[in-house]
Image: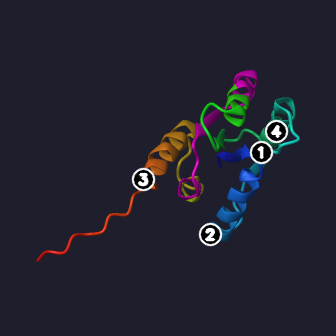
Amino acid sequence: MIGMIVTGHGSFGTGMASAVKLLAGIPEKFMAVDFRQEDSADDLEMNLKHAVREIGNESGILILCDLVNDTPYRTAVELKEKLAEEYRIEIVGGVNLGMLVQINLARGYVANVSDLADLAVDEGRKQILKYEEEEENS
């Protein structure tokens, strides 16, 4: 099974993991890594590396970050490059809860981490919607 790590600023990771557990049960090979105010980028890298090693590399690992091009995302990209020979890691920025729930379920039938990353991006886009009231026909 593809491993998943969700990370972001403050308690974003643990908050999203808590919500996924509430909606979909306790997922396998799923970890949260928070980037707390007192953490440095080095602390975050160490915590992400620990999570990667704990999950292992059966089918790869998808790291999902709260924002694109901010510290958690950039740190995950650097870690991916450092661990490229040991682990198959894909990274997606801009995670939302609907995306997490759907791709968590998809891990049961998607075996390629790159395909799961693509599915995450597609699903994330589908989860964003502006409500529009229908005009009454008079």
Amino acid type indicated by mark 2: Leu
Q: Tell me the distance, in whole angstroms, between the alpha carbons under discs 2 and 1.
A: 22 Å
Amino acid type indicated by mark 3: Lys
Nearer to us: label 1 or label 3: 3
Is residue 12 visible in this depiction of the protein? Answer: yes
Q: Residues within 10 Å of mark 4 (few under 14, many from 20)?
A: few
Amino acid type indicated by mark 1: Ile
Residues at badges 1 and 4 in contact (C-beta under 8 Å)? Answer: yes
Task: Please tell me which residue lies in front, 13 or 113.
Answer: 13
Q: Residues within 10 Å of mark 1 (few under 14, many from 20)?
A: many
Residue bearing mark 2: 23
Residues at badges 2 and 1 in contact (C-beta under 8 Å)? Answer: no
Residue, x 62% and y 30% (percent of image)?
Answer: 69
Residue, x 88% and y 41% (percent of image)?
Answer: 38
Nearer to us: label 2 or label 4: 2
Q: Which mark is residue 126?
A: 3
Q: Which mark is residue 53?
A: 4
Tell me which label, 2 or 3, sits earlier in the chain.
2
Q: Tell me the distance, in whole angstroms, between the alpha carbons under discs 2 and 4.
A: 26 Å
Residue bearing mark 1: 55
Q: Is residue 83 magenta?
A: yes
Tell me which label, 2 or 4, sits earlier in the chain.
2
What SS does tag 1 mark? helix
- Where 6 falls versus 85 (above or below)? below
Task: Please tell me which residue lies in front, 60 or 102.
Answer: 102
Q: Which residues are magenta?
A: 78-100
